[in-house]
Amino acid sequence: MRHTGQQLFMENKMQSMRYYIALAPFWCRRLLHPAGLVLAVALIIGGLNIGLAPGVDAQPNKPAASGPAGVYIPAVPFRNRNRFPPYPHDSFELGEEGTVSLKLIVSANGRVSDIKVVKSSGSSRLDRAAAIWIQSRWRYHPAMLNGTPVASTVAFKVSFVLKK
């Protein structure tokens, strides 16, 4: 069964709430430090039954399913890191404007390894400035397939507009 990211988020949230409810009496009576609560939840999620959450049993390892089905999480840009490229000075002086469509190849380590111009802005200076800026400065959390970082592609548009 394939899950969307939202379904997985909600399932994990509900599962975490069950563990919290099971451990709340210990935490509220100060019998369990908040850090201990986190450790206990991690142990339970990891498959160890330490007796604090009734009904949670360690599940035996299942053989991997054959085929391409798996959990895929797309690449996500670092928050507050990826800034838009500055306007190239020559293009600014010449009054060049446009929107360049790019296809970014994000490697398994999160760096932009290659950029392809899908649709030009009409100015090679604007296209080149956007590509060089993004490839040298932007970083991503890599895409994940079954918990393993993998290379992926990201579509992106950069607009250069002069304020009048």
Image (cartoon, rainbow, N blue to C red):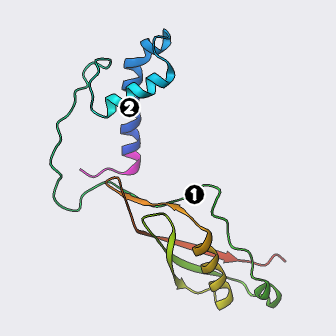
Q: Residue at x 57, y 75 (%)?
A: 135
User: In this rendering, does residue 113 appear at all?
Assistant: yes
Q: Mark 2 points at which residue?
A: 42
**Which residues are the magenta region?**
1-7
Above or below, 137 relative to 56: below
Mark number, residue 78: 1
* Residue visible at 60% across and 73% down in the picture: 136
Foreground: 142 or 84? 142
Q: What element carries label 2?
A: helix
For residue 123, say whether it is visible.
no
On the picture, is 85 further left or further right than 162?
left
The answer to whether 35 appears left or right of 123 in the picture is: left
Query: Which of 44 and 54 lies nearest the eye of the viewer?
Result: 44
Q: Tag 2 or tag 1, which sits nearer the N-term?
A: 2
Front tag of 1 and 2 = 2
Residue 134: give x, y in percent of width and height: 60, 73
Under mark 2, the amino acid is Ala
Question: Of the residues shown, which amino acid type is indicated by label 1?
Answer: Phe
- Disc 2 crowd rating (10 Å Cα; few below 14, some 14-19, many 20+) is some
